Image (cartoon, rainbow, N blue to C red):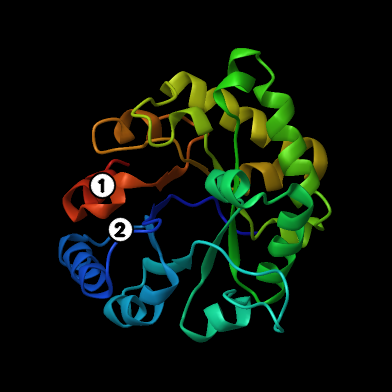
Amino acid sequence: MKKRQHIVAGNWKMNKTLEEGRDLAKDIVERLQPSEVIVVLATPFIHLNSIGNVINGISNLKLAAQNCHQEESGAYTGEISVAMLQSVGVEYVIIGHSERREYFNETDELLAKKVNAVLNKGLIPIFCCGEKLDVRESNHQTQLVENQIAKALFHLSAEVFEKVVIAYEPVWAIGTGKTASPEQAQEMHLYIRNLIAKKYGEELAQATTILYGGSANAANAKELFQQPDVDGGLVGGASLKAEDFITIVNSF
């Protein structure tokens, strides 16, 4: 069984021209210190090939896509298949980010198909789950997260599930400057781990990497990463500045 990992993934979202992205990746490479932390760069599609060349040969620096299509190929204009991602060195794919759910109406049923597509090609899905502010205020966040995980992931066998990385992202804390307190993050991460334990057993639950994805930044990362069930971060805006991003990487 895989061992639980520390991962810091930078989600660039829809930012950076080709040249800007290459410069950012080079800056990250120059600042990165050898460690056991896995550092993942999730770039727009246009960057994947060039960034892959920049980070090639650095063992703990990995390439990720922000999305994929669920079908292997076909008449899906504007979409990208997992095989295409694989061909440029992608190892991780973000699935079900709250912005994909919100702006592109991605359902848990669709995300289950995308998870399957990623796993079938031997890549690693970073599966996102989390609640909006109204759900948090009505205290239904655990029920919602449980439904998201169950519908999109719990069809997998234990052998396949162990390849999945989960990212908890309280939607109310993304891009708002608000952050879940370390205690709130820990509470939900532990809840997710207990869900996995009920489904697949304690050993697999303890081996599963669960990231925090709600406005993690250079100032709060250390306190978040000290929580026993927070294994790293899915970082948005702070991943666009190499100095801030590396500070987060070094927060373990």
Disc 1 is placed on an element classified as: loop
Q: Nearer the viewer, residue 152 or 159?
A: 152
> In the image, residue 239 lies at what x, y percent?
30, 51
Residue 166: tell me if it is visible: no
For the N terminus, the image quarter is bottom right
Q: Name the residue tied to disc 2.
A: 35
Amino acid type indicated by mark 2: Ser
State whether residue 109 appears in this view: yes
Residue 214, above or below 242: above
Residue 219 coordinates in the image, percent (x, y)? 24, 32
Foreground: 147 or 164?
A: 147
First in sequence: mark 2 vs mark 1? 2
Q: Nearer the viewer, mark 2 or mark 1?
A: 1
The disc label shown at residue 110, or none: none
Question: Residue 235's spot in the image, x, y percent?
Answer: 38, 46
Q: Position of residue 67 (x, y in %)?
A: 56, 63
CA–CA distance in space, label 2 to label 1: 9 Å
The structure residue drawn at horizontal position 78% and vertical position 42%, both measured from the top left corner, is 150
Disc 1 packing (10 Å; few <14; some 14–19; many ≥20): some
Q: Is residue 245 above or below residue 193?
A: below
Query: Which three-letter amino acid code belongs to the residue tagged 1?
Result: Asn
Question: Quick check: 41 left or right of 73?
Answer: left
For the residues bearing labels 2 and 1, Cβ distance under 8 angstroms:
yes
Q: Does 26 sit left or right of 36 as displayed?
A: left
Residue tagged 1: 250
Q: Residue at x 80, y 35 (%)?
A: 198
Residue drawn at point x = 51 percent, y = 26 percent? 186
Tell me where residue 216 sits by quadrant: top left
Point out the image quarter for the C terminus: top left
